[in-house]
Amino acid sequence: MNKKNYYITTPIYYPSAKPHVGTAYTTVLADVLARYKKLLGHNAFLTTGTDEHALKILNNAKKANKEPIEFVNDFVLVFKELWKELDINYDAFIRTTDKKHENVVKKVYEKLNEKNLLELKEWIGWYCPNCEENYAMNNIQKIGDQYFCTSKHQLVQKKEESLFFKLSNFTNWIKKLLFDEQPNLIYPKERKNELYNSFIKDGLEDLSISRISQDWGIEVLADVYKTNNKTHVAYVWIDALFSYLSALDYLQTNDNNFQQYWNNNNSEIIHLMSKEITRFHAIYWPIFLHNLNLRLPSKIIAHGWIVTPEGKMSKSLGNVIDPFDYINEYGSDALRFYLVKGLILENDSIFSKDRFIEIYNTYLANTFGNLASRTIAMINKYFNGIVPDVQRYNFYNSYYLSLTNVISDINLAIDENDFTKIVNIIIELNQVVNDLIEKEKPWTLFAEQKNEQLQELLHLLTNIVRITFYYLSPILTIASKEILSAYAIDIKQINQDNINNFRLINNLKTNPLRIIFKRINKN
Ligand code: MSP
């Protein structure tokens, strides 16, 4: 196997409110992906964090009568608490208020300025304090004498001197990148055409990248540009995007992580997010990197939104789904599994409690839970809790051989970052098991004293349990371990070299197994 490095990121979230199930979604996907890459023996580095210099944060802090830094500190703790509860195994948590990040951003502005890519101009526009975005005239809506953005927030008009990045120089470059050089950069690919039609086709517009009216932010180019004695501060997107590099200690004396995970042709850089910020990652980000002679991302995975049966989540509708509620009631594995299996990555998906329960009962309680408990119950009953010693398969050799294909299909799906396929292959495998049990009727084999065949059947089933929970372990981080340890299998000992070594389970003595995924009754 060619051992690779994978750098996997979530967006850095605004710590202006508690995280909700949408933020949990991207973070769980990223964590699951990093764990799958590691399962195949690769190195993976997962970064998440918080985007703290937004105007929204300044405004909310004022409302809460707090200093902005105090205000964000409190929410950062809540984010970290959620990631802990969800068993997110991140390697770096970057805050845009971290000193090392501030240094990176300052340096980036200096380098772009040295390359003559910045220009001081007057920025006039409609600005949405809520979305942290400027809106072009053709994207705003007038109701009465007020103006609103596409998400129906009220806009304010603003005029100020600002540094602009000469994005318009790179229209052809980005077209070439997205259509010729890296046509598969964006997943799903429909998002590329949306971006093309909305932002690239008519030419990119220069991008305003600094503010002087706000002092909550990273001061940049203080020696070069000042207006009325005020220093420019970085305006959101450069600040936010470069967190992916500061998380890797870019420009630090010890930059080993940067060298291993970014500045290395044997590394893949995968950014996860939801669709509304694809533009920033797929257009601006590669252009900035290109101008700094840095490697470009390998993959941008832009999933759809989680919506509720009442529509988009919003505080005013009172339909914001709190991930803590689900974790407290059903456990982190159940929520992780629902996010991966119950939603469709490519589209917007409805998150509903009914569907959550349905997915839980169908797959966790029935399919996987049953396999785990049925097999162990039979080993206990027919073989006094000892997994039978089998040296070679006679009766079920073809089933055993087909496991090799299952393993290579899952591995391929992992290579392709295809979450749905990974889970579906494991589910299919378990359906085969159920059919096999119904067909072979181990209780009849026992009654008819077909001992050798029964030994082999339970050996095969135990091997399937081993494969199933090994491959589910990136999603069911807790249950997989617990189930396998009831079979006396230490998950840490399983790897790609021995996953198919069927004899490793011979003579193991089972331990008691509680019901891990108890059926949930609706109502
Ligand atoms: N700070 C910027 C991102 C900068 S990245 C360099 C930002 N922050 S955010 O707090 O608004 O988080 C947006 C991200 O949260 C989305 O891209 C997505 O990953 C996740 N989600 C937020 N709401 C969501 C849904 N309703 N559904 C799915 N994911 C959502 O944008």
Image (cartoon, rainbow, N blue to C red):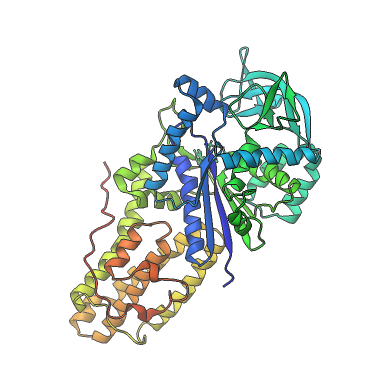
Query: Which percent across, then down, holds residue 142?
Result: 63, 18
- Image-quadrant location for residue 7: bottom right
Of residues 81 and 519, the one drawn nearer to the viewer in this rendering? 81
314 relative to 372 in the view: left or right? right
Residue 502 visible to an observer of this rendering:
yes
103 relative to 382, above or below = above
Q: Which quadrant of the figure contains the N terminus?
A: bottom right
Of residues 454 and 314, the one drawn nearer to the viewer in this rendering? 314
432 relative to 106, above or below = below
164 relative to 424 in the view: left or right? right
Residue at the top extreme, as displayed: 145
Tell me which residue sits at (63%, 49%) in the image. Answer: 250
Tell me which residue sits at (45%, 44%) in the image. Answer: 24
Count of numbered labels shown in the rendering: 0
Q: Which quadrant of the figure contains the C terminus?
A: top left
Query: Which percent across, then down, holds residue 332?
Result: 36, 49
Of residues 303 and 11, the one drawn nearer to the viewer in this rendering? 11
166 relative to 362, above or below = above
79 relative to 516, above or below = above
Residue 430 visible to an observer of this rendering:
no
Query: Which percent across, then down, holds residue 140?
Result: 65, 24
Query: Which percent across, then down, holds residue 408?
Result: 51, 71
255 relative to 438 in the view: left or right? right
Tell me which residue sits at (36%, 52%) in the image. Answer: 333
